[in-house]
Every structure is written in C-alpha cells, then in structure tokens.
Amino acid sequence: MSSSFGQIFRISTWGESHGAGVGVVIDGCPSRIPVSAEDIQRELDRRRPGQSEIVTPRDEADAVEILSGVLDGLTLGTPIALSVRNKDQRSTAYDEMQHTYRPSHADFCYDAKYGIRAWAGGGRASARETIGRVAAGAVAKAVVRALYPEVDVVAWVSKVHEVEAHADVYAVCREAVEGNMVRTADPDAVGPMVAAIKEARAQGDSLGGAVSCVVRNCPVGLGDPVFDKLEATLAHAMMSIPACRGFEVGSGFAAAGMRGTEHNDAFFMDGGKVRTRTNFSGGIQGGISNGEPIVMRMAFKPTATLMVEQETVNDQGEDVTLRGKGRHDACVLPRAVPIVEAMAWVTLCDHLLRQRVADVMPRG
Amino acid sequence: MSSSFGQIFRISTWGESHGAGVGVVIDGCPSRIPVSAEDIQRELDRRRPGQSEIVTPRDEADAVEILSGVLDGLTLGTPIALSVRNKDQRSTAYDEMQHTYRPSHADFCYDAKYGIRAWAGGGRASARETIGRVAAGAVAKAVVRALYPEVDVVAWVSKVHEVEAHADVYAVCREAVEGNMVRTADPDAVGPMVAAIKEARAQGDSLGGAVSCVVRNCPVGLGDPVFDKLEATLAHAMMSIPACRGFEVGSGFAAAGMRGTEHNDAFFMDGGKVRTRTNFSGGIQGGISNGEPIVMRMAFKPTATLMVEQETVNDQGEDVTLRGKGRHDACVLPRAVPIVEAMAWVTLCDHLLRQRVADVMPRG
Amino acid sequence: MSSSFGQIFRISTWGESHGAGVGVVIDGCPSRIPVSAEDIQRELDRRRPGQSEIVTPRDEADAVEILSGVLDGLTLGTPIALSVRNKDQRSTAYDEMQHTYRPSHADFCYDAKYGIRAWAGGGRASARETIGRVAAGAVAKAVVRALYPEVDVVAWVSKVHEVEAHADVYAVCREAVEGNMVRTADPDAVGPMVAAIKEARAQGDSLGGAVSCVVRNCPVGLGDPVFDKLEATLAHAMMSIPACRGFEVGSGFAAAGMRGTEHNDAFFMDGGKVRTRTNFSGGIQGGISNGEPIVMRMAFKPTATLMVEQETVNDQGEDVTLRGKGRHDACVLPRAVPIVEAMAWVTLCDHLLRQRVADVMPRG
Amino acid sequence: MSSSFGQIFRISTWGESHGAGVGVVIDGCPSRIPVSAEDIQRELDRRRPGQSEIVTPRDEADAVEILSGVLDGLTLGTPIALSVRNKDQRSTAYDEMQHTYRPSHADFCYDAKYGIRAWAGGGRASARETIGRVAAGAVAKAVVRALYPEVDVVAWVSKVHEVEAHADVYAVCREAVEGNMVRTADPDAVGPMVAAIKEARAQGDSLGGAVSCVVRNCPVGLGDPVFDKLEATLAHAMMSIPACRGFEVGSGFAAAGMRGTEHNDAFFMDGGKVRTRTNFSGGIQGGISNGEPIVMRMAFKPTATLMVEQETVNDQGEDVTLRGKGRHDACVLPRAVPIVEAMAWVTLCDHLLRQRVADVMPRG
C-alpha cells in the first residue's frame, strides 16, 4: 500500500531506475475528462534529465504511453495506466554500489528494511519514480480544470543555496518561471543561481534549495477535517518527494514568532464574496480552503550523489570509501518544480472529488 | 474517511466540543498488549485545560472510559473504543458565534464546506478533538513499547514568540520538560516564556511558537517508500494538529542553504552497528528510519481566539466586528506537547506493524 | 481495519457482548441529512432480543445515544458516533465457556488467532455486534432517501428449516413482513415456521433458514467495476453477518443449470426508459445496477448454541462435553431481517456516494 | 478505487479488451519471495483462450512481462507491475456494438454509469481483465507457499448445465482436474459436459455451471472479524469474477434446511491438534479459519454472448434486434477454474499478512 496516494483519485506508481520501465496506474479518475498523451508528455518534458545545461545529462526521452483508461481523448472512468520504458543503461557505472552504501542515499535503509535492493541507479529510490507522479499530475490537472477552469498551480525555485529569489507570490506567472533554466520567479536571481549550480558541479558538490508553490482560484471548501486537512495532505504529498526536508504553509515557521493580533486574517465582504485582508492562513483555515491563494514552501536538501571521495560502509559491515562516478545532478531544484506542481494537482483533485460527497444536499 | 489516520493501526476520532463527548476508535491494534485506563488518563491529564496558570481555565476532568477491546488489562485484538464525556457548558458565551465568523478560525470554512456547523465552542474544530488523539497515542505507545521497549519519544516547546529554547536535542529528557509548566527543555527559557504568555493573555492577545520532538532508539527499517515515507506520514500527522503551520525533519529548512559535502552523513561501523557521523538526515533516509534519532520541528501559529475587537463578517454576508468573550488560551504550545508525542507514537506504531508485513522471510 | 466497512460512507463497529457497550462510528456521512435518534431506535427495536416469543429472551432495551455528528436533527458532515450501553449481565452463566470451546462457535478460532478472547457471551463474536450495523443502516437509509426518496429495501424470512415461503419478490411489502413475528412474506408460512421454531426450542435445538431481500427503484449506475461490483460488495456485506453461509443474486445458483437463451434479459424501451423483459440479472449487469429490482437471497446456518450435551475440547487440549445453559435463540432468522436490510442500505449508500465521483461531467 | 482488491497485499488491475494491453500492479508484496515470469505464465496459459476445442478460439499468447518489483527472481518489496499486450484485433466484428446494447452484457450499464464506454469487445468488462487477476494470483501463491509450503488451493468445474460432477471434495487432486479439457474432478462427467458444451455452441447458445474450490492445510487464524470475515472476503473476491451469481461456503444453502444438532461440528483432539468431526463450517468459524479444509462453491451464469438474434435497444433509445458475430465462448467454466484459484490465493495471501499484525506478542 506504500506506493499509492489519494483516497478517491488514487495513484499508484511502480518501477525501478534500471528495470523495464516506470509508470503509474490512476484509479478513480472520473469519466469523460479530456486527456491526451501530449498533455502528459509536456509535463514529463519539464521533468526529464538533459533538458538544460544545469541538470543531470542522463539522456532519456521519457516517452509516455497510455495503456488503458482513455478512448478517443476522453477518460473512460476505468483505471488509467501510463508507462515509460527505461532505456538500456550502462549499469557498470553502478557496480561499486552493489555492495557499498552511498552516504545519505536510501541504499542502506532499503537493505535494512527489505533484505534486498535494486542497487543499480537507486532502484525504486531513484528520481525516475517521480515520472509516474508527473504523469498522474497531468491527468489530475485535467480533472480539476474540467470542473474549475480557473484553478492554477505555479511553483518556482525560491532558493538555491545562498541565493534567495525575491518575488511577489501572488503575481508569479508560469511564463516567467519557464523562461529561465533554473525555473525561478526572480529575474535577478537567475544568474547567481545558475552560477552557483555550475560551480558546485565543477567541484563535484551539490546544493540545497527551496521551491515555493501557489494555488490560485482554489474553490472554497476543499480539505477534510480532521486528519486530512488540506495542509496535512499537501504536506504528506510534498514531503514524499525525494530530498524534501521541510514544508510550510501560509505564515509557516514565521508564525512561531508572531502574535495573534498580527496573524489573524480579518474577514471582509468583497462584492458578495468573503475575503480576508491578509493571508497569513495561506488560504486554509481549519484544514479547509477559504478561497484565498494557497501558499506553500518546501525545503530540499543537496543531492547526496557527489563526485568526491566519501567515508562510508559496505554490506559486509566494513568501513570503506566511495567516490561517485558518472552522471551527477548538482541541484535538483529546477526539476523539482514540475514534481511539486504535480503533487499539488493530485492532492487538489482528490480533495475536489471528496468535496462532492461531503455536501450532497441542495443549498437553501 | 476524513477522521481516520493510519493504515494498519487505524484511529478514528469523533466528537464535537459541545456535544455529548469526544473519543476515538482504534481498529487494528494487536492483541495481548498491556493497556490500562490509567496509562491513557496520564496522557490526557497532560493535555487537559486548567492544569496550570498559563493554559485555558476550562475545567474538565476529561476522564476516559474504555468501552471495548480491552479485557483484564490486555487488548483483545478487537476495536478499542475510548470515550470522554463533555461536561455541560454554558454555551451562551458562544451565542454571538452562531452567525459571526471568528477571524482565522474554522467557522467560515465549515459553513462553506458543509452548509452547517456545530457553532458552539468550535464544534469539531475545537481542540477537544485532540483528546481522541492523545488517548490513541497512549495505546500506540503501549504497542511500540511491547515490541521495542527502548523506543522513546520526547517533545518540548522550543520557541514561544521571540523566546527560543536552547537545548541539546539528543539529551533532552522528559523529566526536565515535565518539570516546568511551559514544557520547554531549556531551564533558562522557562521564565521568559511564562512571562511572555502571561503578558499576551493580559493583553487579550496570543503567541505562536514551535515544538521540537525527538524519537530515540527507533528500529531501523520503518517507513514505506514511496508515498508513505516516514517523514511524509509524520508530516501528515503533525500538520493535522490544529494550528500547525510548518514541519521539518533533520536539517529541515536549513538544508536549503547547504552543500552536499556538508550535509551528507558519513556512515561508519560502531561495534557492528551501522551509524552516521552526523545526523542531518534526521534519522530518515529514502523515507526509511536508519536507526539514528529522528528529529522534527513543528511551527504553531498564535491562537486565533483573542479578547480584542476584530473586523469580520457574519453568515448574512455583512461586515461586522467581534470581541471574544470567556475563556482564552493565550498560547497552545504547552498543551501541544502531548499531542505531538501522541501523533508520533501513532505514526511509529502504524509503521512498526507495516514493517512486519514488508519483510517476512528469514534473513540469511 | 477489520471492523470497518465502506469506502466513502465508512462504518466502524466496536464492542463486546459483556463489555461496557457496543456502537458504531460513521465517517464520511454527508452533511445536512435529517437523522434522529428515533429513526435509529426504530430499527434497533426490530433487532433487539425479547421482542416476541420466538426470539432470545435476553432483555435489553438497547437504547441508542447519538454522541456526535448530529445537531438539531441534521448531520454535520463529521463522524457520527452511536452508542448502546450493555446492561449488567449475570456472566456466571458463561463461566464454563471461559475454558471450553462451544462447537461451531467462534471461541476456538478467536483464541487461536489472538491468543486471548472475551469469553463471556461470545465477546466480539456476539450478535450484539450487529447493533452497530443496524444503527448505521438507519443513517445510511436516511442518506439514500434524502437523495432518492423512492429507493426501498425490504427483506423477509423466505425459509425456516423445511418451511419455504412462497411470495412474489416484486410485490412483497414491509407491512406484511412486519405483521408477523417470524417476518416472512407468505401468510401461509407463518404458522408452520413459528411451530417449527417453538418445537426446536423445546428440544434445545436450533434451525437454519434463508432471508430474501429486494431493493426497489435503485438508481441506474451503482456499483464499481471491477472488484467492487455491486453484487460483490453486497455479498461481502451479507456474508459478514454472523451465521450467513451463502449468497446469491438474481438467478443465483439456478443460473448454473440454465442456457443463455433462457437467461439473457432482453432490453426494451418502456416509455423512454430502458427496461428488461425478465430479471435473471437481478438488477445488476457488469457489476452495475440497471434499474430493475435487485434481488438477493442469503442462507443462514442454525444457531450454534444448543441446550443439549455436545462433544468438544477445552483450552487445555482435552476432550470434554458441554451443555448449553441460559438463554437460547432457536432461530436467528426473524432478527436477521433488519440486519440484512441495514447492510443493504449501508452498501447502497456507499455506492451512491461513489457514483457521484465516477461521473462528474454534465451529460451532453 | 474500484479496480483494487486487498488491504495489505493489494492488487490493482487495468486494461480494456481492445486497448494497448491489460495488467496489474501489486503493492504490498513482501520482499525476497521467489517469483518468476514462468510461474506467472503457467497460470495465464490455463486461462487463455484457444487452449482447447471447447473454449473461445480468440488466439492470444498472453505473454506476461514483469516490469518492476522483481530482481534476479526475488521480489524487492516494491510494486510488482505485470503487463500483457493485446494483439491487434479486427474490431469491425464489434462495430454493431458501438451503439447497440448486448442483452445481459455490461454495455448499457457502463454507458449509464460513465456516459462513455470502450465498446469494442466489452472494453473493461471483457474477460481479458481477469488476466491481471490470474497473474497476481501466481504471485500471491508464491507468497503463501514461501510462508506455508503445504497450503494448497484446487478448483474444479462441479456443474455444467444439467451435468453434475460427483467428487469427494477432500480428495480432489489437481492432476485429475487438469487432465481433462473441461477441468472437472469427476471422470464420468467429462464426456457429458464436453458434449453439452459442444451442442450449445453448435446452437449459438451458452451454458451456466458451477465451480467448486477447496483450500487445504490453511493455517488456523486467518480472517478478520467482523466485516472482513474470511468467508466475506472470499465471497467478495469470487462474486467480483464476471458472470458469478452465487457463493456458498461449507454447508452453504443446505444449511438453511438443517438443525443445529446436525450442523454443529464437534471438536476433538487429534494428536495434539484441535479438529472437528464434521466440516459443515467449511473450515471457517466466526469468520476465522479453523484449520479444516475451506470449501466453497460458486455459480456462474451462461455467457451472455449468443449467436442468435435477440431483442434489445440501442443508445438512441430505439428497440432493435442484435445477432452476435465472431467468436463465442459457449461455456466459461473451464477457464473460470484458474481465475477462481487466483482469487482464492490473493485473498489468502492478504489474510496471511494481516494475521502477522493481529497477533505480535509471543505465545506464553
């Protein structure tokens, strides 16, 4: 049950880095939603390696195939199976990893948990697993948009190591983000971020960073008290992305240093609609969306794969050293952007469908 | 399905603030675990109002009754129903709230979502809901301890508004935390924290803060790739606590500013056991516990209930003002500590049981 | 997870026969459904012991209390907790059962599974567990009726030992069923059935039987391919009732002896509505309701509790004999009727809500 | 959520009859279980069309590919994705079905439920969906056998139309069943069954029948009170197989005509093991396996596809007639046998894993 997410719109990813392929099955997608392979491929292309000079050069086209659940461009209401074949990989680059645990990677823990692991290229813990998420996110987006065309989700890199992006979270637009290879929203940060990433790569090092994400025009009423509050399921979704170390919504950690008189968002009527003067709540109150923009921020640790010699142990319980070889993604942040958006769409879609069964009686 | 948490050890809380009572049903608890009403009551007493001069004075004994699932001090393997009756409340204090939405409370969102709400005292969104969590946490703790007696979970208040607690997260002990009314781990912070809370209360204001939590001696191998990574389910659990706005594990948001060469935790052999030299991973790698202490930090916003006049709207769509009356918890942090611990125990217990079905073959 | 049923409208029963009480928590019930304690009590009264001279004389009022989830007669959208206290029981009648396994009872299996059991009165395996089901069924009925007022579920005793009831399943009405103490639909069968039950009781023996159930005016489209076909979830629901040994829908076991040319239900247009000339499908095709009456039949074994001496073993692994004492329900069939109806309502309600998320786009 | 089955060992099938392929994802399979494509293929070959002269001649090799979750013949603990490509089909044979509803098929109900359907060859309602079940069953069998090598499941055709097989359910062996093309256990029934099927086919007609199934050496303690009783989940599993109309366990419908003194299974000690003198309980008491053979029987309706002219309606609401063309399976029973076994293995496997978390404390 570990590889599934969602209660009604339920996605199950499968696949190892160097097995036959990776993919996802989506169960619970409503019928007659327009979905095309092109829509899905567009998102996968934002995530795939080799798309720019600052991401890992692994060369995979990552072409998606729709195996089921869609007929003539419309969903059937049946499970949608999406698959991407892995290309043949020169796995000799990974031979050393068969018995040696890479520091801060999942290698040791998989062995400890399962007594076995697909050692080549990270196996199930590889970032290739996120292909299924991005593909499912494209379908989730289609569902949400079919019901609420105005909903939008935009994520961007808001920090790379010491470089912070300064942007108005309410005004950030996708075009600006996609217009630079680092996918940030601050034009002034592009140069320093790219430079920092290139420098780290030259050193065989890697950099952490942060992604921010805003959901605009979210309908009021999404999120299920008490355990599946909207922010709790978003946190679950985001913290399940590899390398994510922190999640905050609205005022986030800054809330810890605030007073109620500062933090409370005063309600007011705005042309017949209930709005709030400020948005420290980040669009969610009592676990339920209030119609204001939902604002999140996620911290990502620096990639664990380094091209330097590191102290570690092997599966015989011996102290050894390991020096990374082959490809190396010095900063995952640019490619994390479509993954964050995908998980947001999946979470929103599930809550949208849940809301249709929470309140079924006509309003008076 | 919104009020349930856990896959195998599954808790379902129920109850409104001013209904007949609140409680929890635990389905999936293994048999023959020693559990007593006293164990549960002890944790509830840490959470209940009126326990010190800095928490809300609502006077409720919150006496738990075990309705099912336990016989002669042992669990039966059947659902454990735990119930706490509400005392009669003078709900006239809440009359104004029947039609007016308190700023940054759940009132408006519940009405928007369900078209109805239990308006007295916050209804389902009241902190009384957490009674079920704390009770379930006591049972979860009993299960974990029956299997792994050495596991320990300790949470403490690490920040109140501008006062930070300085403590060695690996050395914090429960006795020190329980020895002061604010439940912090830094003796020097107690006075300033208490003073800040009292001052805020005198002003009718409230304060945000942070809770830290450490899990010690966690077995290796807990956590399910890919969506139910240990940190993802912990984030879900913690972010579902009322007023929680942020979650981080290990290096957390600081990871965003780090390099891989700093952040990677080198493995080494320590008397036959795999250990790491540093613990930026916070005890979790690839979503699976690695045996090092699990370290988390959660941000809580200031309580929304204020004894000052605030701008808001009513359910007729009119701009109005509202001034809080009656009881007022100026800082929820001291009472959040047992809730955080309870959610950690519940999450660990569920993952412990999941691990028993992930790896069933004898190790070679 | 064993004590929960349903995906969206999810019920979780709890309670042992001789513990503090029994009950149910319903999570996922939509808001603003009219529900009253009286509606629930009416169904419980049909199920309770002591209601006529042919059922077990255990005297329990089985008064339900609504603990949460309902305000002023309307559901809140939050969990509905329903509880019935057990009366003090003279458990000395059960002393012998503490160590001796009653033949064809659950005693041995509970001990084998859990290593412990609530031995008094059957514990969790007691028919008292069905109180939670019947209470939940009353709520499910309220939900279904709020959305589709014309849906009706009627069950009746169609066989007691050798006495078969002859009734037109499409014409059976509740009044006729409730008008006789054995709850059959055939006036000519009442006398022989009552006589057979009384004779069995006089002999300390018990009788098996069958319950039939028809759902009328079921909306088209309920049931989820492929595993949660409507008949599959109905079978799950019915076979989970204590003593149920067989389930059939539509033509049922008779289908095994039929030809396709006999069995196929020809479609025809009936005033703009698609109907079938025959109903061997029992109202379900491809796992989905087709609008025709849903017809089911369930077999129940004779009660295992007998007032005669029986060969058995004890928990020390010794061959012993056991002679039942105290109360004795010679035929569970009359009381099974409201339980069957409750499980049908719960299953229909869950599928009705599921259908609201299967097809969300406007029809062309 | 409709296409998934199981709580811990969870299978999700996908695929339409004339889409790219069909398959299954298994989440929750334990690690280090020996599994090979050959094991899976062997079961698929028992299910595939064209294997004998009495089943549908559709010619598909149905070659399985393991896409993930298995490395060097051992499961990884990660999702196992299994896929079978569909061959190109001459779908012109189905053109008429695009707008006309075949009687007693799923066509009308899919359209009514989803507003769309994959009309060629039955789409999702095609028997090809069961490929995923049979593949998953082979994996489930490997898991059960790895833990309990002696468990066995044998199914056979016990009835075809008017021909009953007479066999000792406790002695039936797989070799005898697989040794005849109709897969019955009674050598005397083979001839009449084959003759009946051939005659029906010659007439363009079809025949119903029954499959019996026995589970031998099932460990004591499987099955979860109260809703997931072993017989209830088996009923769910079996009734979800296309064309299944009835399910009974142990005494089944015959129990309705029995007395308690006949039906109760007396316990006795058999060399330190608790056994029962009779087995009317069918190996299950209180929803839990008692170690005796589990005996089930399932009724299947005659195939709905007939090569005769039938009255029906089209999607324009017009009365029309339809005459089947192309391939035609006059009796699904022989191919139902491996499907029944697969569903039994999947259900047992899930309960075996559940049992590992129900009772975790050492026995005294």
Image (cartoon, coloured by chain):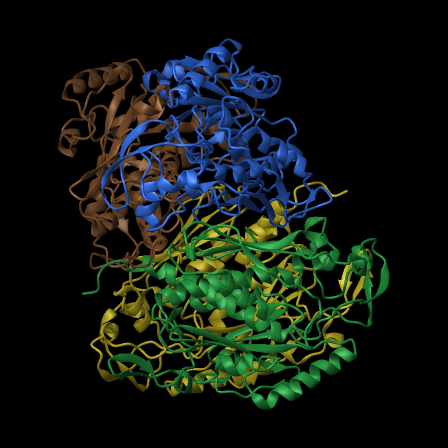
Chain colours: A blue, B brown, C yellow, D green
Spot occupied by residue C109 in the image (x, y as percentages of width and height)? 33, 71
Task: Give whichever of D316, D35 is nearer the camera.
Answer: D35
The quarter of the rendered structure image containing the C terminus of chain A is: top right
Seen at 46% across and 69% down, the residue is: D231
Question: What percent of the width, then of the height, locates residue D54?
Answer: 68, 77
Q: Is residue B300 visible?
A: no
Number of numbered labels in the structure image: 0
- Judge left or right: residue D34 versus residue C137: left
Above or below, A13 against B102 in this view is below
Q: Position of residue A192 (x, y in %)?
A: 46, 11
Is residue D200 visible in this depiction of the protein?
A: yes
Residue B275, quarter of picture: top left
Whether residue A23 is situated above or below residue C183 in the rendered picture:
above
In this picture, is C136 found above or below D283?
Answer: above
Q: Nearer the viewer, residue C41 or C23?
A: C23
- Picture quadrant of residue D186: bottom right
Q: Residue furthest top?
A: A188
Q: Is residue C166 left or right of residue C235?
A: right
Q: Residue at x 37, y 82 (%)?
A: D265
Q: Of all residues shown, which one is farthest toward the bottom?
A: D188
Examine the rendered structure and indicate whether residue A24 appears above or below residue D80: above
- D13 to the left or right of C83: right
Q: Nearer the viewer, residue B298 or A113?
A: A113
Q: Nearer the viewer, residue D154 or B233?
A: D154
Residue D50: x and y in percent read 67, 71
